[in-house]
Each structure stands twice: as structure tokens, then as C-alpha cells.
Image (cartoon, rainbow, N blue to C red):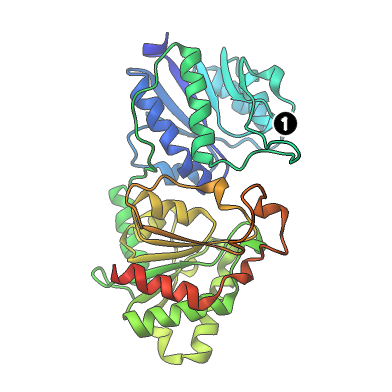
């Protein structure tokens, strides 16, 4: 069955986690030969994966509520998958795949869903006296589960070096150029991208500090600055632009506020790929930058960077700042929200890293 199986990969819910799943999909692709691999993702993430050849197809899961999940399960049932790799940890994801009647269901034994899986794996846990899950990278977490699926299929894992992967389609490239043009950044103009958002407000470096870094990029490196954010983060992006213009009105012509310019996840890939440098909180665009080998400064607090440690194909491409470098390795930053406040990361340190990366 393994050499020509139909395999469903249920992808994570978040953009960054989906990028961190690409090494697992590549491992699967290189290991199972002629098998068909279909990704199942949340709306919007299909745009993230567009143009990438490792998946034969990408399905969008519109599965709100119990009736939505039942409809999705019915849709999957007609496609007659042989196996499913469940990267999300939720009970509902396993229930949907069980309702779809997929005979081989591989996932982590979490959220009380063990009985719904045919091949389950215990997640890595912290050693006594600490409780909870071990802080391992999502890249390794997903790869571990993928190898478990390959073992269930009777297939030896291919010798693949883990790396993040994305592709940009021609349409996405064209839209990226158009979005930048609307923001006053020409096709050959160098720029840096700042990403001040994040799903958790506690993970966001303060507005005035991003504004200070933006001014330094404009004044000292003669770069234009693209301020990125999801539609709900538009007010945050505007606040940073206003903070820059308040102290340095002359910088206004060098700033592009991307949420107001009609972009998509696909155009963001094209924009990130063109950037000279990305300065970001621990959120999705960091992983997009890593997939394209773009120089990146990543700011962590109060989350622990070990959850999202990335394979680094080019040494020195990323500089990571943590709020408290003295935290013992047996502790997890997430457990110390005050000690590991992101506000502890200093502007001069980030600016020094900007100078190092841009002059390397």
C-alpha cells in the first residue's frame, strides 16, 4: 500500500506552524514515492502553500461547528484516503478524521483523543520535578510524528536534511510588487520589513521601540521600511507609523503600511523574499523569512524560543533576542511571564544587530 497510498496531511492552524511543518511534508514526499499527498488547511493557508510542489493538492477546511466538521468528514470520505497524518493536537481534528473513515490515523496522544487514533505517539514531556511538555521545536515535533507514520506504512525515511520551504507563484510575485508600489517602494528599491504583531499581545515588542528601529534603518542604512501586520493589526501598524512621523516627519515618505495596501498571505511571501532584513516578534513572518533565507532579527518574550527553533541552512542568518538570557535551561520562559517580559529587550542591542546583519 505504501508505494501508492493516498495520504492526507492535516496541517496546523497557524501560519508559522504550517511553515514549520514543511520539513515533514518534504520527508513524506521523498519517502513514499508515487503516493498522493494532500494537505488539509485552514482558509488562507492555502495561499501560503501555493506554488509548492511537495503537495499534490491542498484542500481548505471550512469546518465551523459540529455540522461543519461532519460535512468535512463526508467530503474526505469520498476521497478514499489510506492514511492521515494529524499535525494538530486537538480532539476535533482526530474526530473529523475518524468520522471520515480513514483506516490509518497517526497523531500525538493528546487532548483525550487516543482512542480515535490507530497509531499514536506520546509527546515529549519534561523530566521530574517539572511538569508539562518538553520545549522541543515544532519542526522536530512534526518530524518525529512523520517518521512514526512512515514506520506504520512500512517505509524507510528518506535521507532528507530538514529545512523550511515555501514557493512564490507568478501571480503572488506580481501582487507583491504591486503592493510595494502602492506603498512607494519601487521594484529595485531596498527595504526592510518590520513585523510588530503577534497573536498574543504579550509577545509584541513596544510600538516606540519598533519606531526607533525603523528610523535607524531609514536614517543610517538608507532603507525604506515596510510595516507588516494582519488586517486586525492595522491599528498597531498605524500606531508605529504615527510614532515615527511624530519624531521624524521626514521619514514618512519612506514607510509603507502593508495592511492598508491590499496584500494577501501570498503577496507577503513575495515581499518577505525581497526584503534585505526582517525584524519581527515570534510570529508567522519570521518563519517565512527563514524559508527564503532572509536575514532576520527575532524577538522572544515571554515565550521560549525552543518551541520554534528553526533549522538554519545558512549560519548567521538569524539573530535571536530573548528577554532573559540568564533563565536556566531547565526552566521555560512561558512559565515566567514577568521575568521574561519582551520589554526587557533593549533598543540599542537590536540596532547593533541590525548593523551587523546589514553590513555582513
- Image position of 145 with respect to 322: above or below: above
State the residue at coordinates (50%, 53%).
284
Relative to the observer, which residue lies in front, 74 or 299? Answer: 299
Relative to the observer, which residue lies in front, 215 or 229? Answer: 215
Relative to the observer, which residue lies in front, 301 or 99? Answer: 301
Tag 1 residue: 111
x and y percentages locating residue 177 in the rendered image: 31, 63
- Image position of 85 with respect to 295: above or below: above
Q: Is residue 15 left or right of residue 224?
A: right
- Image position of 308 with respect to 154: above or below: below
Quarter holding the N terminus is top left
Q: Say which element carries label 1.
A: loop
State the residue at coordinates (32%, 70%).
358
User: Farthest top residue?
Assistant: 1
Res 113 → quadrant: top right
x and y percentages locating residue 247 in the rendered image: 51, 91
Amino acid at each position: 500500500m505504501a508505494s501508492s497510498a493516498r495520504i492526507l496531511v492535516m496541517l496546523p492552524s497557524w501560519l508559522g506552524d504550517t511553515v514549520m511543518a514543511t520539513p515533514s511534508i518534504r520527508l513524506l514526499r521523498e519517502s513514499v514515492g508515487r503516493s498522493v499527498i494532500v494537505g488539509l488547511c485552514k482558509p488562507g493557508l492555502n495561499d501560503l502553500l501555493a506554488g509548492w510542489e511537495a503537495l499534490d493538492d491542498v484542500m481548505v477546511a471550512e469546518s465551523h461547528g459540529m455540522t461543519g466538521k461532519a460535512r468535512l468528514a463526508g467530503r474526505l470520505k469520498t476521497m478514499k484516503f489510506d492514511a492521515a497524518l494529524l499535525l494538530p493536537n486537538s480532539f476535533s481534528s482526530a474526530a473529523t478524521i475518524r468520522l471520515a473513515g480513514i483506516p490509518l490515523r497517526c497523531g500525538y496522544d493528546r487532548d483525550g483523543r487516543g482512542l480515535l487514533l490507530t497509531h499514536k505517539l506520546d509527546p515529549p514531556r519534561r523530566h521530574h520535578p517539572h511538569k508539562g511538555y518538553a520545549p522541543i521545536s515544532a519542526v522536530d515535533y512534526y518530524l518525529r510524528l512523520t517518521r512514526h507514520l512512515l514506520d506504520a506504512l512500512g517505509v524507510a525515511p528518506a535521507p532528507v536534511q530538514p529545512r523550511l520551504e515555501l514557493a512564490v507563484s507568478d501571480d503572488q510575485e506580481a501582487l507583491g510588487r504591486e503592493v510595494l508600489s502602492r506603498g512607494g517602494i519601487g521594484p529595485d528599491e531596498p527595504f526592510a520589513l518590520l513585523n510588530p504583531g503577534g497573536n498574543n499581545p504579550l509577545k509584541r515588542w513596544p510600538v516606540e521601540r519598533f519606531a526607533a528601529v525603523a528610523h535607524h534603518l531609514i536614517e543610517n542604512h538608507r532603507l525604506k521600511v515596510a510595516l507588516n501586520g494582519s488586517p486586525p493589526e492595522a491599528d498597531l501598524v498605524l500606531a508605529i507609523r504615527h510614532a515615527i512621523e511624530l519624531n521624524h516627519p521626514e521619514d514618512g515618505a519612506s514607510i509603507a503600511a502593508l495592511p492598508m495596501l491590499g496584500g494577501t498571505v501570498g503577496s507577503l511571501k513575495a515581499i518577505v523574499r525581497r526584503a534585505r532584513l526582517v525584524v519581527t516578534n515570534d510570529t508567522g513572518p519570521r518563519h517565512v523569512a527563514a524559508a527564503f533565507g532572509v536575514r532576520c532579527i527575532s524577538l522572544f518574550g515571554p515565550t521560549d524560543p525552543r518551541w520554534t527553533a528553526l533549522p538554519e541552512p545558512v549560519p548567521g542568518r538569524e539573530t535571536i533576542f530573548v528577554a532573559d538570557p540568564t533563565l536556566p535551561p531547565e526552566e521555560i520562559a512561558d512559565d515566567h511571564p514577568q521575568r521574561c517580559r519582551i520589554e526587557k529587550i533593549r533598543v540599542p542591542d537590536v540596532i547593533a544587530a541590525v548593523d551587523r546583519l546589514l553590513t555582513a
